[in-house]
């Protein structure tokens, strides 16, 4: 298989017939690369700011979860658009798919602008609540004020990615993302340290400015591609008059998806509240560990998003048995792949951690974190695959239930109780208290999340879902 066989457009990739593994791989691989490039934004910031001082790294450790929170509040609209485009595409309803895409762009950009204004006004209060103090609070506030004002650009590209993915084109977003990441990596040190036309370095705030500039370019290019319609789904200004009936449909799908994304973000933010009782070094190490997680779990996130598209198109085509086979194939594959990754991470933890760590003590803490949690990486892969199935079918509330149970009901309480050595739990788990309580909460919640997601898939109510507003065509018993 040559390189041009791997990256295929939607017209060359049939998601509703034939085998499952190959089209899912061809769909997910560009998503992996796109998400890896997306993570490069954060990793570039972490790397360059680590050259400044520990305070800068701690500041963006508090900043990143708030970015995630603002984006998550509006993320449900892009998920709804992706699901509707996928199901209409699977049902061969091109005009309905284009209308869904046009309405999604309209509502998502308006929502992101409103969220950005609210976020800007509340930045310092939210960061203080999360535990940022002193110089860390000041630097994190400078970072987040810029990001909040650029929220339409931060969010606009996510909408482009979601709509193209719903249609089945994951290659075009990958190409656009590559160009903007190259730009971000190039201008990041210019704004952080100062050079040429920017004589005075702006530090943490400079990293935010570089990110917003890069995202603005990505959004402009993405919208241009959608309006041209030459790479798949097409949007039209004539279809951007607010449709209240369609908006209600988007809310029915998107609100639970926003709850899921926001719940994830809030849990990360509240985990920082738990972690903030420890030293700045520990906070920085925790942030380094989370950044590395964001890379390790890219295949699981990508496959989950690929499953969302593939399941959505097959349900739109009436091929529900094929949709279920897609779910289980992806879950098994991700469990095996991430378990293999865990072995590699366990063996080479220190070389992975040290380039992103501000000092030796932070490196030691982050190494411990990764090695304790690594054996549960495979369960994260399973959960992501099954959650993608639930979203693709339109059962976004079930997907939200998995995330809320895993993070809010299991991880956070365990982390809080064990990290503070609260009796009687500290007596029952004496080796998982204090800092180790944070690691233990990840181990338990990762495992439980996979089991909950599997149980919901086996229960089967998601198979009956069709959110297009019409009946899905029925297929033969073989679904192929």
Image: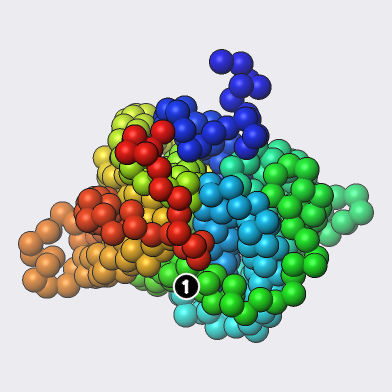
The colour scheme applied to this rendered structure is rainbow
The picture places residue 112, in percent across and down from the top left corner, at 66, 72
What residue is drawn where x is 66% and y is 22%?
4
Looking at the image, residue 439 sits to the left or right of residue 194; the answer is: left
Q: Which of 85 and 464 is in front in this view?
A: 464
**Which quarter of the image is occupied by the C terminus?**
top left
The residue at which mark 1 appears reads as: 252
What residue is drawn where x is 55% and y is 83%?
125
Q: Nearer the viewer, residue 28 or 96?
A: 96
Res. 354 in view:
no
Residue furthest top in the image: 1
Q: Which of 42 and 88 is in front in this view?
A: 88
Looking at the image, residue 336 sits to the left or right of residue 263; the answer is: left
What residue is drawn where x is 54% and y is 70%?
250
The picture places residue 204, in percent across and down from the top left corner, at 67, 61
The picture places residue 389, in percent across and down from the top left corner, at 39, 50
Asked which quadrant contains residue 88, the reply is: bottom right
């Amino acid at each position: 298989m040559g390189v041009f066989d791997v990256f295929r457009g939607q017209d060359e990739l049939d998601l509703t017939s034939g085998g499952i593994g190959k089209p899912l791989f061809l769909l997910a691989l560009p998503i992996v690369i796109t998400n890896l490039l997306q993570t490069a934004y954060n990793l570039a910031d972490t790397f360059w700011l680590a050259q400044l001082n520990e305070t800068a790294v701690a500041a963006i450790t508090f900043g990143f979860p708030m970015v995630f929170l603002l984006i998550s509040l509006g993320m449900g609209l892009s998920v709804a658009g992706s699901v509707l485009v996928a199901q209409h595409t699977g049902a061969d309803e091109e005009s309905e798919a284009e209308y869904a895409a046009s309405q999604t762009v309209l509502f998502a950009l308006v929502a992101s602008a409103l969220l950005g204004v609210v976020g800007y006004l509340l930045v310092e209060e939210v960061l203080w609540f999360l535990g940022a103090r002193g110089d860390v609070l000041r630097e994190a506030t400078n970072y987040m004020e810029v990001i909040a004002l650029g929220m339409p650009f931060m969010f606009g590209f996510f909408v482009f990615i979601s709509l193209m993915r719903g249609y089945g084109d994951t290659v075009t977003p990958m190409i656009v993302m590559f160009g903007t990441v190259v730009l971000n990596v190039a201008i990041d040190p210019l704004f952080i340290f100062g050079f040429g036309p920017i004589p005075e370095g702006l530090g943490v705030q400079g990293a935010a400015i570089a990110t917003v500039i890069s995202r603005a370019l990505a959004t402009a290019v993405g919208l241009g591609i959608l309006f041209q319609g030459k790479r798949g789904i097409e949007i039209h200004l004539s279809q951007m008059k607010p449709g209240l009936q369609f908006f209600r449909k988007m809310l029915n799908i998107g609100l639970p998806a926003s709850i899921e994304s926001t719940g994830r973000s809030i849990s990360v933010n509240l985990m920082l509240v738990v972690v903030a009782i420890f030293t700045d070094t520990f906070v920085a190490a925790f942030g380094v560990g989370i950044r590395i997680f964001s890379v390790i779990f890219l295949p699981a996130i990508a496959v989950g998003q690929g499953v969302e598209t593939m399941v959505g198109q097959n349900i739109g085509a009436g091929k529900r048995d094929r949709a279920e086979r897609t779910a289980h194939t992806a879950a098994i594959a991700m469990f095996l792949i991430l378990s293999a990754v865990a072995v590699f991470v366990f063996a080479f933890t220190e070389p992975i951690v040290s380039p992103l760590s501000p000092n030796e003590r932070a490196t030691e803490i982050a190494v411990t974190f990764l090695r304790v949690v690594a054996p549960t990486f495979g369960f994260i892969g399973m959960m992501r695959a099954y959650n993608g199935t639930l979203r693709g079918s339109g059962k976004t509330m079930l997907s939200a239930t998995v995330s809320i149970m895993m993070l809010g009901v299991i991880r956070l309480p365990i982390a809080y109780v064990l990290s503070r050595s609260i009796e009687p739990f500290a007596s029952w788990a004496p080796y998982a208290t204090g800092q180790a309580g944070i690691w233990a909460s990840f181990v338990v919640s990762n495992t439980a999340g996979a089991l909950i997601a599997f149980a919901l898939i086996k229960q089967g109510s998601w198979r009956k879902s069709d959110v297009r507003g019409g009946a899905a065509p029925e297929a033969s018993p073989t679904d192929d």
